Image (spheres, rainbow, N blue to C red):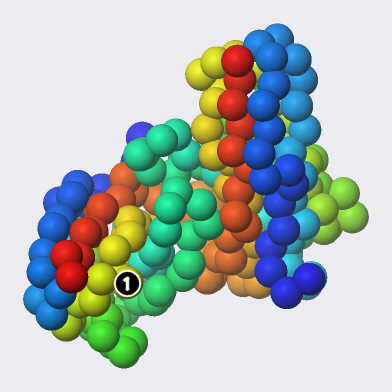
């Protein structure tokens, strides 16, 4: 079963708007990561947030983590058409060293 | 090379045939992952290698699937007696640190006809 689940499954916005994607997970974690995937091929790492961190920024990306609610959010500000992609959260879990990915959010940014 | 390399990029095989998929991780990365992704779906964990530790095979869907990693570097994922439901993109990733940032290859698109 999936450790992380993203919502919404799909999101369509206009260029310049902000996009928010959420991830919920089931067990305690050491860290949570967000990845981007274009065209169903390789994933690209965006940002990693540790369990003792609450918020992290990288350029137009802002990630929050609430370990009490077992959830994270990814905010992309001032979106661009080039941000169109699928976004996945990935978590580790006690007893499993491998990263487990959610089902992803498909973001469409309309120019 | 600078990144994770997977070969072949695309593979079409007949049902019942065996296939081998190859992954060259980034040099020095001790962790290597295999995932499977069906069209429009998330990543399904298959197997994980970390250094000289026993691999985590808990994600392999059946005994037709196996993987090895030779010399702590190149990995091969083998699917025996392929079935149509095996059709998917197979993604390999490597990382320097356990549970750290993973670097992905471009995947192998397997089509079983």
Residue under circle 1? A82
Please say if B47 is above or below B63.
below
Closer to the camera in the image, B81 or B32: B81
Name the foreground residue: A23 vs A77.
A77
User: Residue at 11% of width from left, 64% of height from top?
Assistant: A13
Q: Residue at x 23, y 59 (%)?
A: A107
Where is residue B18? Give x, y as percent.
Answer: 76, 20
Q: Residue furthest right?
A: B71
Q: Quadrant of the N terminus of chain A?
A: top left
Identify whether B106 is placed above or below A103.
Answer: below
Q: Is residue B83 visible?
A: yes
Task: From the top left corner, tell me how far across and down residue B61 is, in percent.
Answer: 55, 25
x and y, in percent, of residue A71 in the image: 20, 61
Q: Is residue A64 visible?
A: no
**Image side of residue A81 versus residue B28, left or right:** left
Label 1 lies in what chain?
A
Q: Residue at x 74, y 38 (%)?
A: B21
Q: Quadrant of residue B35?
A: top right
Query: Residue A17 sits in which quadrant?
Result: bottom left
Badge 1: how crowded within 10 Å, few (<14), some, or many (20+)? Answer: few
Q: What kind of element bears circle 1?
A: helix
Which residue is most to the front?
A111
Percent across and percent down for residue B67 are 74, 36
Q: Is residue B46 left or right of residue A108?
A: right
Using the image, determine if residue B101 lies above or below residue A22: below
């Amino acid at each position: 079963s999936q450790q992380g689940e993203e919502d919404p499954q799909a999101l369509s916005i206009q260029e310049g708007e902000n996009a928010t994607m959420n991830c919920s997970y089931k067990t305690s974690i050491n860290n949570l990561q967000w990845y981007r995937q274009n065209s169903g091929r390789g994933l690209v790492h965006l940002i990693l947030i540790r369990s003792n961190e609450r918020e992290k920024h990288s350029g137009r990306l802002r990630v929050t983590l609430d370990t009490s609610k077992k959830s994270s959010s990814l905010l992309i500000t001032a979106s661009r058409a080039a941000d169109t992609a699928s976004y996945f959260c990935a978590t580790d879990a006690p007893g499993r060293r491998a990263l487990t990915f959610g089902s992803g959010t498909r973001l469409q940014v309309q120019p | 090379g600078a990144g994770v390399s997977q070969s072949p990029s695309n593979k079409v095989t007949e049902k019942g045939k065996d296939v081998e998929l190859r992954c060259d991780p980034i040099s020095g990365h001790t962790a290597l992952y295999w995932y499977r992704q069906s069209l429009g779906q998330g990543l399904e964990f298959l197997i994980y290698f970390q250094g000289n530790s026993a691999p985590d095979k808990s994600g392999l869907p059946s005994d037709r699937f196996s993987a090895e990693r030779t010399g702590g570097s190149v990995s091969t994922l083998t699917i025996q007696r392929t079935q149509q439901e095996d059709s998917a993109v197979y993604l390999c990733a490597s990382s320097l640190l356990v549970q750290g940032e993973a670097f992905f290859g471009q995947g192998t698109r397997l089509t079983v006809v």
